[in-house]
Image (cartoon, grey):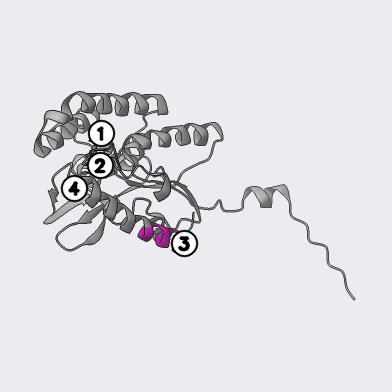
C-alpha cells in the first residue's frame, strides 16, 4: 500500500477563493434598529459583505450602510425618523405619512441611485396588482425604499414602473432565497420579528410599526377578555399567513 503525503502551503490557503457573503436584513419597524448592532459586530470582526438584501426597515438600513454611513450615523437618522413619527403620524393621513418618510429619505439620499452604492443591494417589494414578489436593484433609491417600506394600511402603494408596490414583508420579510439566487455561499440573516406566540395579538401591527399603539376594546361589563380592533384582527391573520410562508422559505434557503 502506497502512502501519499498532502501538503498545503500558507500561500495556497491565502489564495483560496473567499466564499461570497450576503447580509439579509428583514423588516420589523422599530425592531429593525437591531440591524445596526449587527453592522457594528461585522465591522469589529472584519467580516466583508458582498451583497445586501433588505426589506422595509432592513432595506433602509442596508442602503445607508452601502452608502458609507457608519452604524452611529445610521442609528441617529433612523431614531430621528421614528421620534418624528411618534409626534406626527397619529394625526396624518396615509399619504401625508408617505410624504413625511419621503422627505426624510430625500434629505439623507438626495438623487442617489443604486449605482452609487459600494455594496450591491436588493430591495424587496410586492406588486399588489399581480401578487408577485419584486426585486428592486436599479434606478433611484428613494422610490425603491418607499416601496419596500410601504406597509399596507399604514402607507399607500408606491406607483413605480407600472406596478403598485408595497412592503416586501407581505410575502417574505427575510428574503434569504434571493441571496441564494444571486450566488451567495454564506448568508448572515437578521430576523427581528417575534415568534407568533410571543407577539402581542392585541396591538395593531400597523400601529406598532409606526411606533404607535391602538387600544383593544373591552366589551365585557365584568372586565373580561379584551376584543382587538378590526384592523388588529385582520393583521393578526395576515401575520399568521406570512409567518408560515416565512418559515417555509427559510427551510428552503437557510442562512
For this orientation, the residue located farthest to the bottom is: 1
Q: From the viewer's perspective, is 240 left or right of 47? A: left
Q: Are marks 3 and 1 in contact (CB under 8 Å)?
A: no
Residue 131: give x, y in percent of width and height: 21, 62
Figure quadrant of the N terminus:
bottom right
Which residue is painted at 38% across and 33% down in the image? 33
N-terminal of the two: label 1 or label 4?
Answer: 1
Element type where label 1 sits in the image: loop
Separation of marks 3 and 2 at Cα, in angstroms? 28 Å
Q: Are marks 4 and 3 in contact (CB under 8 Å)?
A: no
Q: Which residue is mark 1?
A: 213
Q: Main secondary structure of the magenta part?
A: helix
N-terminal of the two: label 4 or label 2?
Answer: 2
Q: Which residue is mark 2?
A: 204
Q: Say if residue 169 shows up in the picture.
A: yes
Which residue is painted at 28% across and 37% down in the image? 223
Q: Are marks 1 and 2 in contact (CB under 8 Å)?
A: yes
Element type where label 4 sits in the image: helix
N-terminal of the two: label 3 or label 1?
Answer: 1
Residue 25: give x, y in percent of width and height: 39, 44
Q: Nearer the viewer, residue 181 or 25?
A: 25
Q: Are marks 1 and 4 in contact (CB under 8 Å)?
A: no
Q: Nearer the viewer, residue 75 or 184?
A: 75
Give the magenta-colored segment's residue range: 244-253
Disc number placed over residue 41 in the picture, else none: none
Residue 58: give x, y in percent of width and height: 34, 41
Q: Which residue is mark 3?
A: 251
N-terminal of the two: label 1 or label 2?
Answer: 2
N-terminal of the two: label 4 or label 3?
Answer: 4
Q: Say if residue 195 shows up in the picture.
A: no
Separation of marks 3 and 1 at Cα, in angstroms? 33 Å
Separation of marks 1 and 2 at Cα, in angstroms? 7 Å
Amino acid at each position: 500500500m502506497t502512502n501519499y503525503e498532502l501538503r498545503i502551503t500558507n500561500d495556497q490557503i491565502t489564495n483560496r477563493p473567499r466564499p461570497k457573503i450576503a447580509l439579509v436584513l428583514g423588516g420589523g419597524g422599530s425592531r429593525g434598529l437591531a440591524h445596526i448592532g449587527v453592522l457594528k459586530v461585522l465591522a469589529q470582526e472584519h467580516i466583508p459583505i458582498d451583497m445586501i438584501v433588505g426589506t422595509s426597515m432592513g432595506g433602509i438600513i442596508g442602503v445607508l450602510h452601502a452608502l458609507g454611513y457608519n452604524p452611529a450615523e445610521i442609528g441617529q437618522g433612523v431614531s430621528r425618523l421614528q421620534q418624528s413619527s411618534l409626534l406626527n403620524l397619529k394625526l396624518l393621513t396615509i399619504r401625508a405619512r408617505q410624504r413625511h418618510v419621503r422627505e426624510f429619505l430625500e434629505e439623507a439620499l438626495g438623487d442617489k441611485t443604486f449605482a452609487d452604492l459600494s455594496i450591491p443591494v436588493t430591495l424587496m417589494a410586492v406588486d399588489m396588482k399581480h401578487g408577485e414578489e419584486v426585486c428592486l436593484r436599479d434606478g433611484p433609491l428613494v422610490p425603491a425604499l418607499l416601496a419596500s417600506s410601504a406597509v399596507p394600511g399604514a402607507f399607500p402603494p408606491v406607483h413605480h414602473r407600472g406596478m403598485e408596490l408595497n412592503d416586501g414583508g407581505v410575502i417574505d420579510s427575510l428574503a434569504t432565497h434571493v441571496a441564494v439566487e444571486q450566488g451567495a455561499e454564506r448568508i448572515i440573516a437578521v430576523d427581528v420579528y417575534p415568534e407568533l406566540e410571543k407577539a402581542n395579538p392585541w396591538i395593531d401591527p400597523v400601529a406598532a410599526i409606526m411606533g404607535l399603539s391602538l387600544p383593544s376594546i373591552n366589551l365585557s361589563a365584568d372586565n373580561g377578555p379584551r376584543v382587538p380592533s378590526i384592523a388588529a384582527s385582520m393583521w393578526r391573520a395576515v401575520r399568521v399567513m406570512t409567518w408560515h410562508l416565512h418559515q417555509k422559505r427559510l427551510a428552503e434557503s437557510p442562512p
